[in-house]
Amino acid sequence: MRKQHLLLACGLLLLTLSAEAQRFKGGAGIGLLASQVDGDNMEDYHKPGLFAGVFAALPLQDGKWQLQGELDYMQKGCKATNEEGEGMLNTYHATFHQIGMPLLAQWNCLKTYRLEAGFSFNMTPRISISRNGEKWDASGEDTYRFFEWGGVCGLQWQGEGHWGLHLRFLYSLTPVGKSLYSRAGLRHNSLLIHTTYTF
């Protein structure tokens, strides 16, 4: 009798998990970032970078909201060129290779448009810096931090087919490193545009 109850419970659990799995929607995205690092005394979004990621979305019961989790690769950083005089240039180029795990709430405000906002837990396994053509890996330096909490907000257009377009603003909620110019520390400040394909 106990075996029958156990088999029945396992069967109901598998049916429930199967039904929930069918509600999930998955996909992938690719795009470009324009970045700067606040607190480094270099302004404007001069640093281009690549973005690629995968996502899983769970529509909620009312149909207006859904939750989306992602696993993303992002190239953030900063880039500057200053003239030192007599034709001499001082160039600086920093790339933070980040792995991000955002969790977003998305609201279907119109038929094909969604507003989205949430948080992202980011890791920076590699930081490459080039100054006046000389390159080095700064990943192990005390100036920078491996972990970062970030905020995300944006607007998504979802076509009737599988394709969508996202515009996002990404900002560091915790410092990514020490700054000589700001008590708030170094913080990533990025604009992202990327296209998605939902399976």
Image: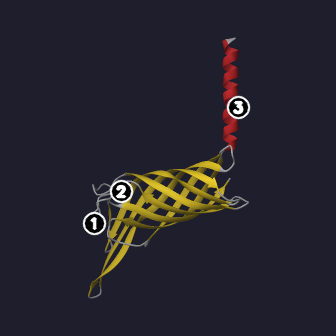
Measure the C-alpha gap from mark 1 to mark 3: 57 Å
Q: Position of residue 53 (x, y in %)?
A: 55, 56
Circle 3 — which element? Answer: helix
Tag 1 residue = 181
Within the image, what quadrant is residue 186 found in?
Answer: bottom left
Q: Which residue: 70% across, 27% down?
A: 12
Q: Which amino acid does label 2 sit on?
A: Val
Q: Where is residue 8 in the image (x, y as percent from the top left)?
A: 70, 21
Name the foreground residue: 76 vs 125: 76
Within the image, what quadrant is residue 91 found in?
Answer: bottom left
Measure the C-alpha gap from mark 1 to mark 2: 14 Å
Disc 2 packing (10 Å; few <14; some 14–19; many ≥20): many
Q: Which amino acid does label 1 sit on?
A: Tyr
Tag 2 residue = 176
Tag 3 residue = 15
Residue 87's place in the image compared with 110, above or below, is: below
Residue 170's place in the image compared with 2, above or below, is: below
Circle 2 — which element? Answer: loop
Q: Which residue: 58% across, 49% down?
A: 68
In the rendered view of the protein, which quadrant contains the N terminus?
Answer: top right
| Residue 95: mark | none
